[in-house]
């Protein structure tokens, strides 16, 4: 069996990248089967030592000074382009921790989940690095589905995702893709190449819609394979250090592309989206029924806001559609503000 896994990482001046790579390798059952595609955006004035990886044939780098960077989606697009036919693919952030034998566990899931093209994704639980340099992994929260915690015109109607409820059953589906952890068939890198003109808001929702309409089914893992770093001090550097004017300009482009993809009714045929439109396998209406989202009216089934996973779809009949509410109305019914805290990334 070909057990090669392509590990795609976009890293922006991240001093955690070497530790992440070491942990990824040392925690794998078959580290020799890993192949890395890394878009490294570097600052000449703040060097990060990657020398021990450069001579390793398992590593492919695309390196760019930060002045050439155009953001996370642009970088992930480049990392995906380093895929070389590996049968499995893992997309993660550059500041992660890994479970023991994460590679064989994810392949096991891929081979047993009830779908032709399963895509395993979640908002990863957190870890901290203690003063003794030991990793403190969060294990008491369970494996949680994603929920919509904010959904407004201010963010281009791109749903803001947060942790929802724990999925206790087997083969639990997830409504949304989380860019910080995606395990998929390798061909996902070609089928759903990330749109370099997206930026931050809306990237994961666009990938969700495009993956679903290309025939990918999203599942939660049945055990925790990775953790995301909890930034207890200063957050990592990000592209928006370039200033508000740059961020606003990029967001305008990204929000317009999300509008065309999700809200215009032309997401499959809109020529300006090119290869970054919806897929040919399933329709946007099918996604709405699966996820419980009424995109035209900006309403959703309450399960979308609480994070109760679909089983196997959210909308079964008209009575389910009748339960859909705006997020403002759901907040009123829930008796509180459900706006998400700023997620780690």
Image (cartoon, grey):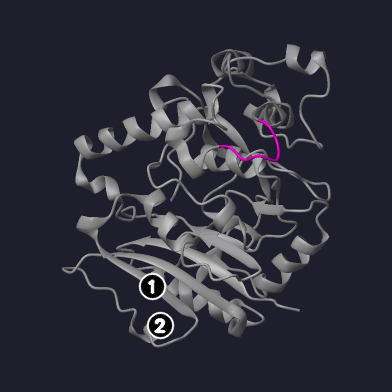
The answer to whether residue 125 shows anywhere in this view is no
Percent coordinates x, y for residue 317 in the rendering: 83, 18
Percent coordinates x, y for residue 231 in the rendering = 40, 55
User: Based on the displayed image, in which of its 4 quarters is residue 88 positioned?
Assistant: bottom right
Mark 2: secondary structure: helix
Majority SS type along the magenta span: loop
Residue 287: x %, y % from top left: 68, 32
Q: Is residue 58 left or right of residue 122?
A: left
> Are there few (<14), some (14-19), or many (20+) residues within 10 Å of tag 2?
some
Q: Tag 2 or tag 1, which sits nearer the N-term?
A: 2
Please state, as top left, top right, bottom left or bottom right, where the N terminus lies in the image: bottom right
Distance from label 1 to label 2 (Cα)?
A: 10 Å
In the rendered image, the residue lying farthest to the left is 45
Depth check, front residue: 317 or 222: 317
Which residue does the image show at 32% across and 30% down from the upper left?
252
* Residue of label 1: 61
Marks 1/2 in contact by CB < 8 Å: the verdict is yes
Please, what secondary structure does the residue beneath circle 1 have?
A: strand
Residue 216 in sight in this render = yes
The x and y percentages for residue 288 are: 68, 27
Read off the magenta span: 278-283
In percent of the image, x 50 and y 64: which residue is there? 8
Does residue 27 sit above or below 9 in this rendering? below
Residue at position x 83%, y 24% in the image: 316
Q: Which mark is residue 142?
A: none
Residue name at image x 39 percent, y 47 percent = 196
Q: Which mark is residue 53?
A: 2
Q: Is residue 38 magenta?
A: no
41 in relation to 19, above or below: above
């Amino acid at each position: 069996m070909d057990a090669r896994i392509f590990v795609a990482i976009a890293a922006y001046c991240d001093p955690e990248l070497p530790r992440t790579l070491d942990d990824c390798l040392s925690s794998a059952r078959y580290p020799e089967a890993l192949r890395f595609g890394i878009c490294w955006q570097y600052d000449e004035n703040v060097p990060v030592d990657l020398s021990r990886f450069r001579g390793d044939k398992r590593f492919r780098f695309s390196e760019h000074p930060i002045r050439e960077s155009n953001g996370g989606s642009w970088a992930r697009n480049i990392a995906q382009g380093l895929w070389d036919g590996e049968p499995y693919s893992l997309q993660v952030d550059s500041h992660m921790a890994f479970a023991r034998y994460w590679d064989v566990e994810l392949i096991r899931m891929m081979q047993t989940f009830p779908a032709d093209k399963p895509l395993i994704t979640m908002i990863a639980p957190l870890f901290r690095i203690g003063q003794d340099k030991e990793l403190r992994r969060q294990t008491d929260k369970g494996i949680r589905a994603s929920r919509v915690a904010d959904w407004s015109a201010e963010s281009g109607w791109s749903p803001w995702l947060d942790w929802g409820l724990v999925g206790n059953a087997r083969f639990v589906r997830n409504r949304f893709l989380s860019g910080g952890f995606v395990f998929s068939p390798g061909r996902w890198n070609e089928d759903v190449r990330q749109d370099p003109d997206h930026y931050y808001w809306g990237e994961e929702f666009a990938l969700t819609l495009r993956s679903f309409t290309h025939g990918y089914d999203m599942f939660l893992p049945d055990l925790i394979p990775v953790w995301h770093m909890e930034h207890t001090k200063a957050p990592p550097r990000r592209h928006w250090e370039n200033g508000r004017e740059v961020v606003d300009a990029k967001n305008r482009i990204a929000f317009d592309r999300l509008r065309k993809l999700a809200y215009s009714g032309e997401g499959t045929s809109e020529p300006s989206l090119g290869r970054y439109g919806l897929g040919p396998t399933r329709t946007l209406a099918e996604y709405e029924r699966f996820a419980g989202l009424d995109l035209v009216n900006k309403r959703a089934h309450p399960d979308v806001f609480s994070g109760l996973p679909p089983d196997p779809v959210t909308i079964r009949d008209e009575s389910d559609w009748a339960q859909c509410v705006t997020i403002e109305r759901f907040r009123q019914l829930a008796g509180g503000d459900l706006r998400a805290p700023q997620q780690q990334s």
